Image (tube, rainbow, N blue to C red):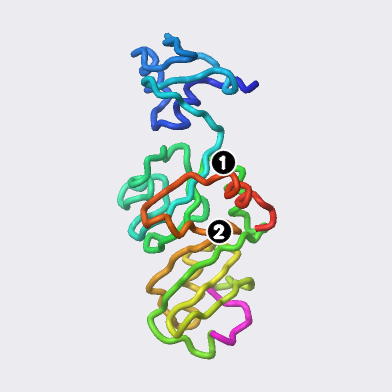
Amino acid sequence: MMKIRIEKVIASLYPYTRAEIKDLIKKGLIKVNNEIIKKPINIDTEKDLVYFDNELIKYKEFYYYMFNKPAGYICANYDKYESTIFDILDLDNRQYFAYGRLDKDTEGLLIISNDGKLGHYLLSPKHKVAKKYYLKVNKEFTENIKTYTKPIKIGEDEFIKDYQFEFIDDFSAYLTIYEGKFHQVKRMLEFFNYEVIYLKRLSFGNLVLDKKLKLGEIRELNQDEIEILKSREN
């Protein structure tokens, strides 16, 4: 049995504050087991049926989403000057977070969830969760970068030791990294005097971007994908 406040159940699916939810209750828009409630109550999530505006709410503590991020948006929850991913997502930016942020002009796989424990695991440098990118550069790759195996310097006293390049052609490659430093991929390529002109994340750990998911689209992860994401073998 899991007893929680009804405000938390409503807020898990709708972008309302607690005060706004209390107002919805006063208006008679919330039912529990088909009876209109008059004030906030505790409910049993395993037994009680909660309805908002006659629609059954299926409560889960945590939600996990795969988002194919388009360029032009930053991954902050709120920004006064820039457009954020939450401007185009129907998710409450007070509850959900993007784990493994992407730069404004970078596309691809973004994991969005309200599971802070998972986010901490995925982002912790000590776990070295792999992230694979597809990139294009402004000029032809030379043997210098193709044969380079030493740590890559991206700043004063900053070096990237763990990485794998897979060269596709003279201008594009896959790059797998295990950290999430600021502008890391771009800075790694700058070390070799290249400019990244296109960048897309393809995978995070063993979770691969769904090829059917178009730019700007989001979908909930299925149970198998959640288990993949939580796997300690990432």
Amino acid at the residue labelled 2: Phe
User: How many residues crowd around disc 2 within 10 Å: few (fewer than 14), some, or many (20 or more)?
Assistant: many
Tell me if 207 is positioned left or right of 37 in this view: right
* Res 115 label: 1
Q: Mark 1 packing: few (<14 Cα in 10 Å), some, or many (20+)? A: some
Q: Is 90 on the left or on the right of 120, as rendered?
A: left
Residue lying at the far front of the rendered structure: 212
Of the numbered discs 2 and 1, the one sitting upstream in the chain is 1
As drawn, the label of residue 72 is: none
**Helix or strand or loop: what does disc 2 sit on?**
strand
Residue 45 in the image: state x and y as whole percent: 57, 23
Region of the chain picked out in magenta, as a range: 146-155
Residue situated in front as seen by the camera: 222 or 149: 222
How far across and down, in percent of the image, does residue 96 sit?
Answer: 47, 41
**Residue at image coords 59%, 47%:** 226
- In front of the other: 78 or 157: 78
Marks 2/1: CA distance? Answer: 16 Å
Q: Position of residue 26 (x, y in %)?
A: 37, 12
Residue furthest left as drawn: 81
Q: Which residue is mark 2?
A: 204
Quadrant in the picture for the N terminus: top right
Q: At 58% across and 44% down in the image, what residue appears?
A: 223
